[in-house]
Amino acid sequence: MRRAALGLFAALLAAAHWVGGCAEAGPPAPPGTEAWVSVQAARIAVEIADTREEQSLGLGQRDELAWGRGMLFVYPEPGFPGFWMKDMRFDIDIVWIRDGHVVGIQHQVRHLPTGPGPIYRPPELTDTVLEVPAGTAAAHGWRRGDRVRVERLQPR
């Protein structure tokens, strides 16, 4: 019974998703996806890092991050979180977000195999940070002020 219910739930998720209250057909979420993040016309499948441990590890120790994927860091209060490239094996863009709007973008942040490198901070208070493969923000034309929508697939 439980397996059938999970199968039905997965089929429903694959058949439709909700953006801004409107049902739209779309591809099923890749494995490990906890939410969809939409900026302009782009829709990114993300994992969520909202615990201290998850945020400390981030995308470190991974070999790659596929195009259309990302990690969303969620903070309980706005602040100036510091990001470094410790244990990173690929380059990323860092998108700083506050109250559902882009407040800054750090393009093409390089990984350094020899150490963590510099610490990157947002240009103003932020409550959410999106990490995506390097070049994503430029390819989609993201800029300061863009609206960001987060659709969690399951409550935590």
Image (cartoon, rainbow, N blue to C red):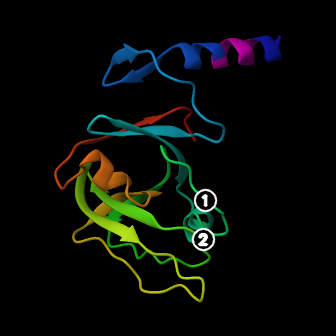
Residue 146 at x, y = what percent? 20, 46
Q: Write down the region rendered in magenta.
A: 5-10
The quarter holding residue 7 reads: top right
Horizontal relation, residue 119 to residue 85: left or right:
left
The quarter holding residue 107 reads: bottom left
**Residue denoted by label 1:** 64
**Residue denoted by label 2:** 89
Which amino acid, mark 1? Glu
Horizontal relation, residue 28 to residue 73: left or right:
right
Residue at point 32%, 73% (across, down): 80
Which amino acid, mark 2? Arg
Residue 89 at x, y = what percent? 60, 71
Residue 136 at x, y = what percent? 38, 52
Is label 1 in a helix, a strand or a loop? loop
Residue at point 41%, 76% (across, down): 82
Q: Nearer the viewer, residue 97 or 89?
A: 89
Main SS of residues in magenta: helix
Is label 2 in a helix, a strand or a loop? loop
Question: How many numbered marks are there?
Answer: 2
> Mark 2, residues whose alpha carbon is within 10 Å: few (<14), some, or many (≥20)?
some
Horizontal relation, residue 42 to residue 104: left or right:
right
Q: Quadrant of the C terminus?
A: top right
Residue 9 falls within the magenta-colored stretch: yes
Q: Is residue 148 above or below residue 2?
A: below
Say which label, 1 or 2, has the lower sequence index. 1
Residue 82 falls within the magenta-colored stretch: no
Q: Nearer the viewer, residue 9 or 79?
A: 9
Q: Is residue 108 above or below residue 120?
A: above
